[in-house]
Image (tube, rainbow, N blue to C red):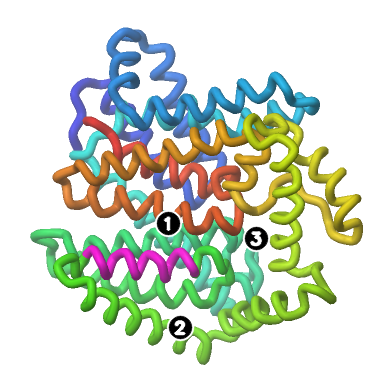
Amino acid sequence: MLFTNPIDKFYQYCIIASIFFLPLTVLGNNLAIWITVLVWLFSGDYQNKIRAIKENKLAIASIVFFLIHILALIWTENLGWGLEMVRKMLIFCFALPIFLTICKKDNTQYYLFAFFIAIGISEMLSYLVWFEVLEPFGKATIFEPTPVMGHISYNPFLAFAIYLVAHELLFKENITKFLRFLYTFFLISMTFNMFITGGRAGQVMFFVGIIILTFQFFKESQLKATVVAILIISILSYAGYNYSPLFKNRIQQISYDIAKFTTNPNTSIGHRIIFAKNTMEMIKSSPIIGVGTGDFPFEYKKINQLRSPNAKGTVHPHNMYLFIQAQLGLIGLIGFFWIFITQFRIAFKSKDLFVSHVGVTLPLLFMVIMLSDSYLLGHFTSNLFILFSSFLYSRN
């Protein structure tokens, strides 16, 4: 492992710990992240630290996005909820900018191993519940064997891990036979696990990851990439639909929800359609600056009572883009997209194959699943985005 001094060594172990704990324990992950932040804040050398942050464009974009939330507190009427939203966004002001300056690309393999081991533990627990070796615990049931985190978060983790393991197999040079065997087994077991757990956004993320990976591998021939991607997705979809009752049920549920929307809107898809329609009405009232950082629940309740009184309320519209636009207006949405644009620019300019590939894939995958939920509000997925961004786009 590369480090330059004792405090840097401490940082590197904390980063590895935060990545390892991320899929396993909220407390452990938070402790590792915020202890690192506190040590950074109180360990001096502030001139060089500030300079390092100013030199990283993603750190600046992240801080600006956070400051827009602070600014929008000025016109919010629900200051308490506004402060809760600010708390959720603290990682964009402290964790991401700081981690961007202390992560080292030379330690990428250690960061990846920590993530793979943790996902392996999560997957093993999932299988033990599914095979009824263990009684369901945590968030798990026999039909939803995801004990450590709910399926809404678990499947995106699984999809991203599948992409990373496949990338290592396809592009990693000088990989040992043992590691190739281990990664291949891991890839197969995770893919099977994807179809016995029910997170539909994660499953979409899984298929999008396959498409991206195929085009990265066959970069010289888009036709070949298209044919191979269609073939792989068709085979996996067919197998999943015919051999996974849960996957089949989730697909059929989508069709049912859409077909019955006019007569029964109180379904998973129906709720999202209503949330989107009502949120669009909210956006019309203040398209430039939004309703304020804390006012979404209150403003949504008023619109919901008027337009869809029989539908349930919500504190966010299960769409990150609509949520940001409604709260912070066009100003906030521009700040939000600035983060992704900066990530793409860094990845496109990088001569490191891992950074150029994964650095494009990470924001793309999140941009897809954020159409169906506010994935940068939840602990697991937001910290996944932050921690992987930290070493992918670091200048060190």
**SS at mark 3?**
loop
Residue neighbourhood size for the residue with mark 2, other residues' Cα within 10 Å, grouped as few (<14), some (14–19), many (≥20) = some
Q: CA distance from mark 1 to mark 2?
A: 19 Å
Q: Tell which circle, 1 or 2, labels the residue nearer the N-terminal end.
A: 2
Quadrant of the image for the C terminus? top left
Q: Is residue 7 left or right of residue 5?
A: right
Q: Please state which amino acid type lies under the numbered disc 3.
A: Lys
Please indicate whether residue 49 sits to the left or right of residue 353 in the image.
Answer: right
293 drawn magenta: no
Determine which residue is flagged by label 3: 139
Marks 1 & 3, CB-CB < 8 Å contact? no
- The magenta segment is 204-216
Q: Which residue is mark 2?
A: 237
Check disc 2 and report its element: helix, strand or loop: helix
Q: Quadrant of residue 100?
A: top left
- Could you say whether the residue bearing mark 1 is in a helix, strand or loop? helix
Residue 50 coordinates in the image, percent (x, y)? 34, 14
The one of 81 and 218 positioned closer to us in this rendering: 218
Q: Can you tell which quarter of the image residue 264 is in?
A: bottom right
Q: Tell me how far mark 1 sits from mark 3, CA to CA.
A: 25 Å
